[in-house]
Amino acid sequence: MILAIDQGTSGTTCLVVDEELEVRGRGYVAVGARYPQPGWVEQDPEELWTSVLGAAEAALTEARLGARDLTAIGITNQRETTILWERASGRPVHDAIVWQDRRTAERCRELPAELIRARTGLVPDPYFSATKLEWLLARPERPQGELAFGTVDSWLVWKLTGGRVHATDVTNAARTMLFDISRLAWDDELLALFGVDASLLPEVVATSGVAGEAELLGAAVPVASLVGDQQAALYGQGCFEPRDAKPTYGTGSFVLVNVGRDPAPAPPGLLKTVAAVAAGHDVQYAVEGSVLTSGAVVRWLRDGIGIVGEIDEVERLAVEAGSTGGVVFVPALAGLGSPYWDPDARGLVTGLTAGTTRAHLARATLEGIAHQVADVLEAHPDGVAFLRADGGASRNAFLMQFQADILERPVEVVAETESTAIGAAALAGLAVGVWPSPDAFAALVRRGPSYEPSMAHDEVARRRAEWRLAIDRTRSRDLRGQIPGPVRTG
């Protein structure tokens, strides 16, 4: 039995998974967020921790097991979210700064884009951890040697081990903008650039391998995997081979393409990142496209402007509408990620008339999510072998069908949409011998519905042209009309 902990932006999910990949128990605890200023997003690190305890207990209760029955724990987490805490007391010195936060956009314009891309595979953007950490370090009146930095995985391992282990894995380190993905080591030049002392940093460990022993609900259990959520979803879908690809539809949408051991730079507008490193094995890389606002915009329809009462209502309205009525919605509520990298872009709705209804806007919202994923895949010149979707919104049949239509290729959905948690379980199980090889695990992954494209090519071309026009209007004035890709400004 493996406990998979998936600490996400909107909540924590825990699954108890057996050796046949059957989910024996589930637990979920929602977590809140704070928005102190426009574009700022923060969370309480202690709430993230207590949500893990609550979700783990609920999953074990449903499975009718105790923590002593567990073989291992796998942890996957929202990436880039940045936490700084006191080593002596374990108390956070500030709320966690969430990956969506845009407060350091101005600082990112000053950064050496070519150096950062060459060392880290990333582009200078507030999305990543380094400028968040730099902002936090400008505030505490404590020596850096008394503090510890980590992404959410590091924070949870620290709490689970009572402060005995300060670690992160290569997939999370690769998202900090401080880590050389070729040497698999913290980069001294980047640490100096952001004023970060090496004493702050966690030890970097393998993605699949025992990082330490946790004390969970009265039992000692090995932590056998640490992995960023999108890399976890890649393996949870069984995408172990080059050109295997997956889009995850969550708070944002993230498309990863496995490129194996290929160290070549990513295509323009996309990111190169570490897919995984298993103890004693070679590194695997992935090319990633990051859409910053996806499922979050559907929640905004409910919580922000109140045009729906329940999330499921959006799909029903989209189907009833029959069309968008000419409305195009670019949901850039937190700027634009891949392939544009424009932190100053803002959401835009075009084509409104007196006849526009909430159903038209609901449909345009879902279509906008699919268009953003299509932008990412179009930027990948080598294409993909197959596309497997997961995440909460992959249960939306209208969205998946429109995604297949706009891509003009089939989209397969996995039966278990919690692929991030399944991926964490896979990597933990491989580390402790539950499965002898990735192939043995991949054979157990169950497939769900497959969506075949049905839209005429001319109609696809027309829709994509409308979308590109709306994107150009969305982008910040200085960047309009530029070719999509990693943008260096300032």
Image: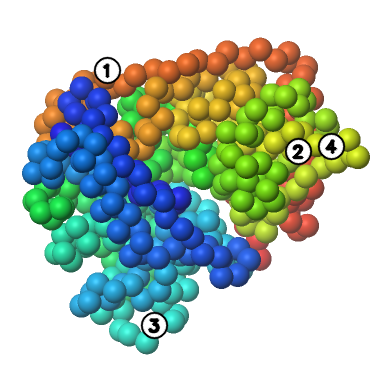
> How far is the residue under mark 2 from the one under mark 1?
43 Å
The numbered disc on residue 355 is none
Q: Earlier in the sequence, mark 1 or mark 4?
A: 4
On-image quarter of the C terminus: bottom right
Q: Is residue 260 visible?
A: no
Q: Are marks 4 and 2 in contact (CB under 8 Å)?
A: no
Amino acid type shown at disc 2: Arg
- Which residue is painted at 49% across and 40% down in the image? 250
Q: Please tell me whether residue 237 is drawn above or below residue 206 in the rendered image.
A: above
In the displayed orientation, state which residue is furthest to the bottom. Answer: 141
Q: How many marks?
A: 4
Q: Which residue is mark 3?
A: 140
Which mark lies nearer to you, 1 or 4? 4
- Residue 178's quadrant in the figure? bottom left
> How far is the residue under mark 4 from the one under mark 3?
50 Å
Give the image location of residue 262, x and y in percent: 38, 34
Where disc 1 sits, the SS reads loop
How crowded pointer 1 is (Cα within 10 Å; few <14, some 14-19, many 20+) is rated as few
Q: Which residue is mark 2?
A: 358
Q: Earlier in the sequence, mark 3 or mark 2?
A: 3
Which mark lies nearer to you, 4 or 3? 4
> How far is the residue under mark 4 from the one under mark 2?
7 Å
Q: Are marks 1 and 3 in contact (CB under 8 Å)?
A: no
Give the image location of residue 413, x and y in percent: 46, 22
- Which residue is painted at 33% across and 54% down in the image? 51
Give the image location of residue 212, x and y in percent: 13, 53
Amino acid type shown at disc 4: Thr
Where disc 4 sits, the SS reads loop
Q: Earlier in the sequence, mark 2 or mark 1?
A: 2
Q: Which residue is mark 4?
A: 356
Give the image location of residue 482, x and y in percent: 73, 47
